[in-house]
Image (tube, helix red, strand yellow):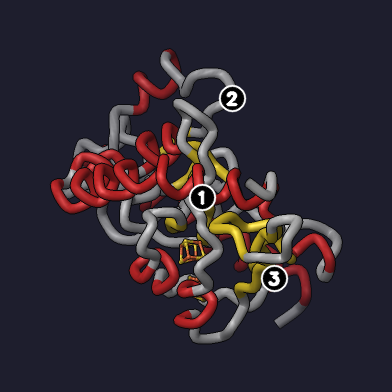
Amino acid sequence: MSIGRGVFRGHWITLRRFLLTFARDVRDGLALRRRGGGPLPVDLFRGPAPGQERVVVQDERTDGLFTVEYPDERLPVYERFRMLPVLIYDDEDGNVRCTSCNICAKVCPPQCIWMVQAKSPKGTVVPLSEEFFIDMDVCMNCGLCAEYCPFDAIKMDHNFELANAERHQTHVFDQRDLLVSSAYYAQTHPEAWASPEETTERAKVARKKDQRLRKALGARTGA
Ligand code: SF4
Ligand code: SF4
């Protein structure tokens, strides 16, 4: 076959596929439906709010595979999706819940958490973390640290857009990178936040908080 015929044939196959797909969509009443479901006119006139990407889902009328045009579109992130851990501080008073007890570091299978516990001027340990690190390249997103934390201080986050051009130092997250507010967690995990287990856990931790902070600040000032 000459080169010219091959090019023509390739174009014909593509055109035929395009026409067949289009005809099938018209026949099945899908012509005004967008990939992933939802009426197309709504998309044309009412796009996502500024700064937000369109979330697409495969509904029951979507036939076969469809392409998500990430990053302009994205699949919904479900509440139980786990990416990296974050450390929680309370909105009302800025209290960082972590006591630097080291339990999360001990249970972490790939050993990618490490921390420095705060010390008083006398050298005694204080239930606060001076520094806290997680190597995001090593974390395998298992969630064990969050399961075992007795102070409700470390939770799994949804943010997966963490790539950058530097592959070493900036992939070790420190306390500043890891801290998020309790309001942020409540917003990203509404079901877990409202669950009886977490409500009870929060109340338990809050009851012990004053005692812990008094101890920590007393030790820090050498009182
Ligand atoms: S995050 Fe929880 S388990 Fe880990 S050191 Fe802090 S208080 Fe302990
Ligand atoms: S999610 Fe798993 S691997 Fe990642 S820091 Fe927590 S325990 Fe370690």
The residues tagged by marks 2 and 3 sit, at their Cα atoms, a distance apart of 48 Å
Calculate the distance from the C-alpha at mark 1 to the C-alpha at mark 2.
44 Å
Quarter holding the N terminus?
bottom right
| Residue positioned 29% across, 28% down in the render | 39
Residue at the location (14% across, 47% down)? 196
**How many neighbours does mark 3 have within 10 angstroms: few (below 14), some (14-19), or many (20 or more)?**
few
Say which residue label 1 marks: 215
- Is disc 2 placed on a helix, strand or loop? loop
Residue hosting label 2:
51
- 47 and 99: which one is in front? 99
Which mark is in front, 1 or 2? 1
Mark 3 vs ligand 2: CB below 8 Å? no
Q: Which of marks 1 and 2 is nearer the N terminus?
A: 2
Of 207 and 146, the residue lying toward us: 207
Check the image and report above or below for 193 versus 102.
Answer: above
Q: How far apart are marks 3 and 1 (CA)?
A: 84 Å
**Dot 3 corresponds to which residue?**
5
- Location of residue 66 in the rendering, given as x and y in whole percent from the top left corner: 40, 54
Q: Dot 2, crowdedness within 10 Å: few (<14), some or many (≥20)?
A: few
Q: Which residue is drawn at 35% across and 63% down?
A: 150
In the depicted structure, whether residue 165 falls above or below residue 54: below
24 versus 101 height, above or below: above
Mark 2 and mark 3 in contact? Answer it, CB < 8 Å. no
- Looking at the rendered structure, the kind of residue marked 3 is Arg
Instruction: Give the mark nearest the N terminus, 2 or 3.
Output: 3
**Extreme front residue here?**
223
Expressed as whole percent of the image width and height from the top left, the position of residue 58 reads 29, 49
Q: What element carries label 3?
A: helix
Q: Tag 2: residue type?
A: Gly
